[in-house]
Image (cartoon, grey):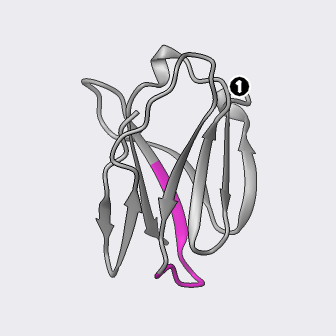
Amino acid sequence: FVSPAVASGRAQVQQEPFLETTEGTGINITCLHPKKQSNDYVHFYRQLPGQSLDHIAVVYRGSKPLPDNAGSLSLAEDGRSSWLWLAEPRRGDAAVYYCALGA
């Protein structure tokens, strides 16, 4: 899992440069956004090897499961940071993960 720092508009988000886990062992992908404003949403994207960028989740406040991913993903944010939790990652989840702030 790779999650590079990404600049988005007026606010910069920060992510761990590299995360690693074994198949089936949960992993938390964290996005720091200390300048998030009240009307900003947090978007998560991933890019599988050789494929285009895919929007996988958005959160405004609080947390939510993402059922279209078989219950393996959940998302939360507290205003300053957000987390994308992969409960049981599979080999097919190995990708570059991005977060960004936006409308």
Residue span colored magenta = 35-44
Q: Residue at x 48, y 25 (%)?
A: 93
Q: Residue at x 58, y 23 (%)?
A: 89
Q: Is residue 50 above or below residue 29?
A: above
Q: Mark 1, residues whose alpha carbon is within 10 Å: few (<14), some, or many (≥20)? A: few
User: Residue 74 location in percent, x, y?
Assistant: 69, 43
Identify the amino acid type marked 1.
Ala
So how many labels did they put on this image?
Answer: 1
Question: Is 29 included in the stretch rendered in magenta?
Answer: no
**Which SS does the magenta portion mostly show?**
loop
Residue 10 position by quadrant: bottom left
Look at mark 1 in the image and give the residue it sits on.
70
- Where is the N terminus found, in terms of image quarters? top left
Q: Residue at x 31, y 60 (%)?
A: 6
* Farthest-out residue, left: 50
Side of 97 where 88 appears, left or right: right
Question: Is 43 included in the stretch rendered in magenta?
Answer: yes
User: Residue 28 location in percent, x, y?
Assistant: 58, 43
Q: Residue at x 60, y 84 (%)?
A: 38
Side of 71 where 77 appears, left or right: left
- Label 1 sits on a secondary structure element that is loop
Residue 97 position by quadrant: top left
Residue 86 position by quadrant: top right
Q: Is residue 16 above or below residue 26?
A: below
